[in-house]
Image (cartoon, helix red, strand yellow):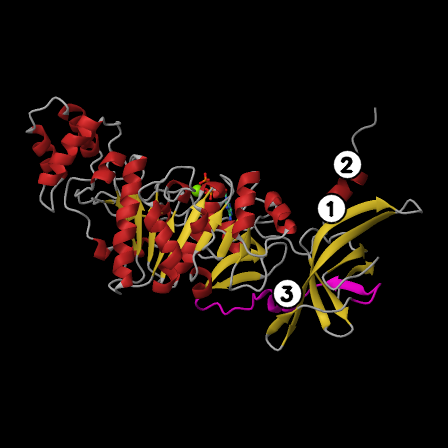
Amino acid sequence: MDEVGFLTGSVQPTDFRLKLTDKSVGYGTFIKVKHDVYGWVLARVESLKTDLDDFDEEKTIAKARTIGYFEDGQVLSPKTPFTPSEKAYLADKKIISQVLGLDQSKEGSIYLGFLENHDIPVYLDVGKTIGKHVSVLAKTGAGKSYTVAVILEELLKNKVPVVIIDPHGEYSSLCVENDDYDNMVKYNVQVRSYMEQIVEYATDTDINPAAKKFNLHANFTMEELLDLIPIRLTDKQKSVLYTALQDMDEDYSLSELIERIEEEPTKFKWKVLSGLDDLMKSGVFDGYPTPYDKIVAEGRCSIINLKGTAPAIQQLVVARLTRELFHRRTISRIPEVFYLVEEAHNFCPERGFGDVMSSPILRTVAGEGRKFGFHLCVVSQRPARIDKNVLSQCTTQVILKVTNPNDLKAIRTSIEGFTSGMEEEIQQLNIGHSLVVSESLNQPITVDVRVRETKHGARPILDEDGKITQPPRKPRPKPKTRRGSGGKQRKHRRPGFLRFLKRFFLKPPQK
Ligand SMILES: Nc1ncnc2c1ncn2[C@@H]1O[C@H](COP(=O)(O)OP(=O)(O)OP(=O)(O)O)[C@@H](O)[C@H]1O
Ligand SMILES: [Mg+2]
């Protein structure tokens, strides 16, 4: 066992100080201390401080928080303090896995990466993780979409139906194989493409040619049209629109509405027509409406790529799609689904940041979705700007680096049992490292998120027939060889031997 120090000062059951004798112990290191009554107890180093002692010797004092001990399948907390001056050791894999709840089976789980600073893979139970909605929150560039893609790869492997609201058109990268071989070896990940499971729809296929066209049926309500038309209409212009809408059949198209307004003998129609023309140009309302029934199916991942489409139309797409799919799920017409909303602050903003068309249905799904197996996942770089009713319903939180005080406050209020230590920690996280709070874990943990199987930031390449092809695989790096060793790596060569030779036999001439 690796001894790392001993307890010092007053000792409590929940936390204690430790005089370190091992300099490798850092922030987040798991240690174990033997308790007279409860046996081995797991603790985590939360802060460190180095000072000079009375003899001018360096001393490092660590503050550790007790996590608990494992007994009869349960994680319990010690009720009485440890013996003062008790020795502390580096925690072993068994106690860490048991107490944190990492000893999950690989089957039916999400392999997210390694426990930070430890060689312990983190597997999260699929059902418990997505069952009660998920939020992935972090400042921009901290690794949200990357982490989400890792979760999606795992869900697709488990044949969970997925729908992705993709405002930036970044998730078709799930079709493209990764070529970061070094990291794949490190995380024990295989190259893979999910091309066979993915159907990408796009509202604008001119800029997203690899996707199928996504069309909506026009039959707008008056409220929808007032939100969608980019110009502010006067009362007279609104009245032209309202009268025309009253005259339309139930299943009217946008061109029919335009034709109807063109017949109006009034000058107030022109502004209305110009607004409707803008809607026509979006291309979302012409063509055969996309059937909702095919979007959710076992093992299928439907990407709704909204790149290039105006925000109000994006919100209408999300409102209609969510409403239709949720309704179908409540009557069991489609299977359970993982419904991912990227840039969620634009689709269900916090009150005070405007109410948009998709807000009410996303609020309903957050509140009632879990009963029906409609699993929501919201992703955002502005937690403070997401509707708190939605955020607080997500009981699995994946939080990467956040520094904005308002965003930290929103996270603090949405997570039960959020501690000041956690708040400090998420401000210090490295890119790609995330704090995970989940029912499938006994404790919040920090994960070094694994490398992707598919290539982050890649767009699928189409062949002459319009089918997706993989880019030619990069040659895998060969093990490094030394020059002059005949291509084979020499074994048992002592490190620094060349430097030794140079120092004694190849000294530069003295001046
Ligand atoms: N787990 C990881 N492993 C390796 N690289 C990562 C990881 N996570 C993030 N990165 C790197 O960080 C970059 C930014 O990640 P990502 O695109 O996921 O950020 P984001 O939080 O979604 O940003 P935005 O707010 O702009 O959408 C990626 O291009 C990638 O290079
Ligand atoms: Mg992103």
- Report whether 484 appears left or right of 290: right
Residue 437 % position (x, y): 54, 57
Residue 410 % position (x, y): 52, 45
Crowding at mark 3 (Cα within 10 Å: few <14, some 14-19, many 20+) = many
Picture residue at 11% right of the left edge, 46% below the top: 251
Q: Quadrant of residue 207?
A: top left
Q: Quick one: 293 or 232, which is closer to the camera?
A: 232
What is the CA distance from the residue labelled 1 to the residue labelled 2? 14 Å
What is the CA distance from the residue labelled 3 to the residue labelled 2? 51 Å
Label annotation for residue 96: 3
Q: What residue range appears in magenta? A: 82-108
What is the CA distance from the residue labelled 1 to the residue labelled 3? 37 Å
Q: Earlier in the sequence, mark 1 or mark 3?
A: 3
Task: Give yes or no for contact between labels 1 and 3 (Cβ–Cβ under 8 Å).
Answer: no
Q: Amino acid at mark 2?
A: Leu
Residue 283 % position (x, y): 20, 36
Q: Earlier in the sequence, mark 3 or mark 2?
A: 3
